[in-house]
Image: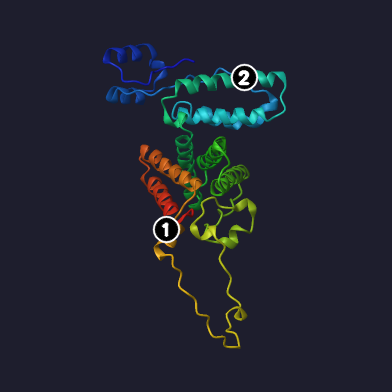
Amino acid sequence: MKTFISARKVTRTELALILGLQTQNVARTDLALIMGLQTLHVIMAPPSLPALPPNLKSVQHYLKIAMDYETRDPPISYWCRLHALQQGLTLKKAKEDMSFLLALMDWLEKTKNEMKSQETVSDEIVAQAHIENVAVKLFNWADTEDRQERYNKNVVKAFYSAGMLLDVCSVFGELNEDVAQQKKYAKWRAAHLHNCLNSGEKPSEPAPKPDDDQALNDSENLEYGISTDSNKQPIPGPSRVQDVVAPSINVPPKVVTPPSVPTYVQESNSLLVTPEQIAQAQKHCKYASSALTYEDVPTAIENLQKALHLLQSGHQS
């Protein structure tokens, strides 16, 4: 694995040597940043892979996204290729397919070793939070443009990339319902806008906002991925009259002895949370920490509030 620039602080002499020998690998804007900060990040060489075999065509989307993020966000590039590998291993494979997958596997192993100092590679919780944050930012931008009827190829690509990146998050485990719906909507909307731009037709209106439950249920393809608290529990219907009518016979109330256990003990029991819920709260705190790394304060606040609510109530917000 060739590393263009090492991830450590360098002296001016070393910096001059790097810039003199490897200027072709560093953009001018990167040079200005390097000269100002002298703190360099690992930039991994792209993998030298065989041509993608026809049997593995279904993973080419993830490899394309990996190339898009090769220099601007190498950890995302790494996880996209890992997801492509995992998907490729589930397919029916010929000899040439295995040659490609083994080459990709070798690159992933070397890259992980080279980038082990980066939390977005070494820590799966931080990595998942980072990828989701990037995907959600893309999605929100595309959705805003879509609702303003500013249709163009950039909007299509943003929806498409958001859906693919959320797909990649499945390497960390099963996606929760909100993420799965957002991924599905992003992919559908990207395809719909792409087809409309090619045909000259006007796109259909975006999916309704999540507070419109009935509209969301009209079509499975139009499930909108960002849910609110009002979505998570079904809204109860009106009570029937017979459910609340008092009985015709007046029965004297039974005398009940008050419980001897103090009330505060019962209250403390109601606040107990399971180890799984504690782990989930820790995950939200990790997400918040990762968001602050990228100065994404709203996402950090949202995840800290979710962690606090979970620990206080024992329920997800």
Q: Which element type, helix, strand or loop, lies under badge 2?
A: helix
In this view of the protein, which residue sits in the foreground, 250 or 61? 250
| Residue 241 point in image, percent of width and height | 60, 81
Q: Which residue is mark 2?
A: 102
Image-based side of 188 in relation to 124, left or right: right
Q: Residue at x 44, y 67 (%)?
A: 260
x and y percentages locating residue 279 in the rendered image: 47, 43
Q: Amino acid at mark 1?
A: Ser
* Residue 141 appears in view: no
Image mark for residue 233: none
- SS type, badge 1: helix
Q: Is residue 49 left or right of residue 119?
A: right
Residue 296 x, y percent position in the rendering: 38, 42
Question: Nearer the viewer's eye, disc 1 or disc 2?
Answer: 1
Horizontal side of 74 relative to 99 (left or right) equals: left
Tell me if residue 133 comes above or below residue 89 in the rendering: below
- Residues at discs 1 and 2 in contact (Cβ within 8 Å): no
Alpha carbons under labels 1 and 2: distance apart? 54 Å
The percent coordinates of residue 224 (x first, y second) are: 56, 52
* Crowd around label 2: few <14 · some 14–19 · many ≥20 (10 Å): some
Seen at 39% across and 18% down, the residue is 5
Q: Nearer the viewer, residue 83 or 279?
A: 279
Q: 26 above or below 162?
A: above
Judging from the image, the colouring scheme is: rainbow
Residue at image location 37% in from the left, 11% down from the top:
21
* Tally of numbered tags: 2
Q: Residues within 10 Å of mark 1 (few under 14, many from 20)?
A: few
What residue type is disc 2 on?
Answer: Leu
Left or right position of 210 against 32: right
Give the numbered dot on residue 268.
1
